[in-house]
C-alpha cells in the first residue's frame, strides 16, 4: 500500500530579495491532519515560507504543491480555489478596525459565498463560541477588545470557513504567558475539531511544544532539522539545542550592526 501524498510538499524552494537569500533550497512535507511548527529566529525565512505556499510570493525556483497541485506560477481563479482551503491567523490578529467583530469573523464567508448578512452574523456568533467568546462580543469593535480577545477573534476568523489548512503566524506574540497558553489550547482544540492540517511559525518554544506534532527549524534559509516534537530535546542538533535553550553561544549567530 502506497504512502498517502502530503497535503503540502515543497521541493528545492529558493527565494531571494535582491542580494538577500531568504529560502535556500527548502524541502518539506506536511501530512494531512498534521500540525507542523516552523521555528527559527527573526529573519530566518518563516513568514516568507508560508507566503510562498499561499502564492503571495513566487519563489525563483522549486516546486510547491498543495493537494498535488503546483502552486508556483498559479494565478487567478485556480489560486483562489487553493487559498479557499486555507485559514490564517495573522500576527497581531490583523483585524479590520472599520468592521465589527462579527463581520471580521464572517469576512471570508461574506466574500466567497452568497450567504445573507443575518446568516453570516449567526455563523460568526457560533464560531466565536468555539473560541470561548459569547454573543455580546459579536457587535463590539476590535478597538474595544483586549489583546487576548483580539487573538481569539482572529482565530475564529481563521476557522469560520472550515478550512482544510490553517496557518498560524506567531500566534502568541504580545500575550502574557497565561493568555498565550489559552490561545495554544484553543488552537489545538480547533485544529483537531476540523481535522485540519496546521502550519505554525513561531519562536515561542512553549507554543511549539503544545501545538506541534512535528517541528522544522529554519536557519539562514535552510531547514537544519525536521523531526517529531517528542525528539526535540534529544535532537543532537547544535542549532536546535541552542535555540530551544536560548543560549547566546553556539552555531547560530545574530547579525548585529556595529
Image (cartoon, rainbow, N blue to C red):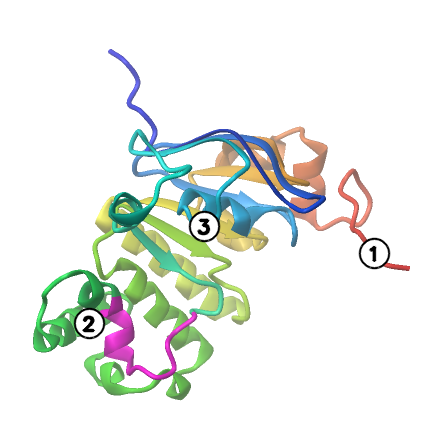
- Residue at image point 71% right, 51% down: 246
Q: Which residue is more in the foreground, 53 or 179?
A: 53
> Mark 1 or 2 closer to N-term?
2
Look at mark 2 in the image and give the residue it sits on: 124
Rendering coords of residue 135 (x, y %): 20, 80
Q: Is residue 30 left or right of residue 26?
A: left
- Residue at image point 61% right, 40% down: 218
Does the CB distance between marks 1 and 2 fall below 8 Å? no
Task: Name the element at disc 2.
Answer: helix
Task: Name the element at disc 1.
Answer: loop
Which residue range is magenta in the image? 94-107
Q: Which residue is more in the foreground, 225 or 179?
A: 225
- Residue at image point 35% right, 52% down: 188
Q: Nearer the viewer, mark 1 or mark 3?
A: 1
> Mark 3 or 2 closer to N-term?
2
The answer to if 103 sits in the magenta stretch is yes
Q: Quadrant of residue 120?
A: bottom left
Look at mark 1 in the image and give the residue it sits on: 256
Q: CA distance from mark 1 to mark 3?
A: 32 Å
Look at mark 3 in the image and give the residue it sits on: 210
Q: Is residue 109 left or right of residue 250?
A: left
Q: Which residue is more in the foreground, 84 or 35?
A: 84
Crowding at dot 2, Cα within 10 Å, few <14 / some 14-19 / many 20+, comes out as many
Q: CA distance from mark 3 to mark 2?
A: 27 Å
> Mark 1 or 3 closer to N-term?
3
Relative height, residue 194 to residue 251 (above, below): below
Q: CA distance from mark 1 to mark 2?
A: 45 Å
Asked whether the viewer can see residue 133, the reply is no
Mark seen at residue 56: none
Q: Is residue 44 left or right of residue 175?
A: right
Amino acid at each position: 500500500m502506497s504512502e498517502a501524498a502530503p497535503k503540502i510538499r515543497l521541493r528545492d524552494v529558493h527565494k531571494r530579495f535582491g542580494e538577500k537569500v531568504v529560502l535556500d533550497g527548502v524541502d518539506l512535507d506536511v501530512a494531512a491532519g498534521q500540525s507542523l511548527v516552523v521555528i527559527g529566529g527573526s529573519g530566518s525565512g518563516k513568514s516568507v515560507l508560508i507566503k510562498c505556499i499561499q502564492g503571495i510570493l513566487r519563489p525563483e525556483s522549486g516546486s510547491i504543491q498543495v493537494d498535488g497541485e503546483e502552486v508556483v506560477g498559479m494565478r487567478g481563479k485556480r489560486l483562489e480555489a487553493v487559498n479557499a482551503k486555507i485559514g490564517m491567523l495573522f500576527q497581531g490578529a490583523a483585524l479590520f478596525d472599520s468592521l465589527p467583530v462579527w463581520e471580521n469573523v464572517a469576512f471570508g464567508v461574506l466574500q466567497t459565498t452568497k450567504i445573507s448578512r443575518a446568516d453570516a452574523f449567526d455563523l460568526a456568533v457560533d464560531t466565536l463560541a468555539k473560541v470561548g467568546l459569547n454573543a455580546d462580543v459579536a457587535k463590539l469593535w476590535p478597538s474595544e477588545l483586549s489583546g487576548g480577545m483580539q487573538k481569539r477573534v482572529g482565530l475564529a476568523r481563521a476557522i469560520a470557513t472550515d478550512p482544510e489548512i490553517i496557518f498560524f503566524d506567531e500566534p502568541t506574540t504580545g500575550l502574557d504567558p497565561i493568555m498565550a497558553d489559552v490561545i495554544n489550547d484553543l488552537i489545538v482544540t480547533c485544529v483537531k475539531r476540523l481535522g485540519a492540517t496546521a502550519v505554525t511559525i513561531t519562536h515561542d518554544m512553549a507554543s511549539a511544544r503544545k501545538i506541534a506534532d512535528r517541528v522544522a527549524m529554519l536557519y539562514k534559509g535552510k531547514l537544519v532539522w525536521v523531526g517529531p516534537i517528542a525528539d526535540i530535546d534529544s535532537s543532537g542538533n547544535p542549532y536546535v539545542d541552542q535555540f530551544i535553550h536560548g543560549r547566546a553561544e553556539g552555531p547560530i549567530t545574530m547579525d548585529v550592526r556595529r
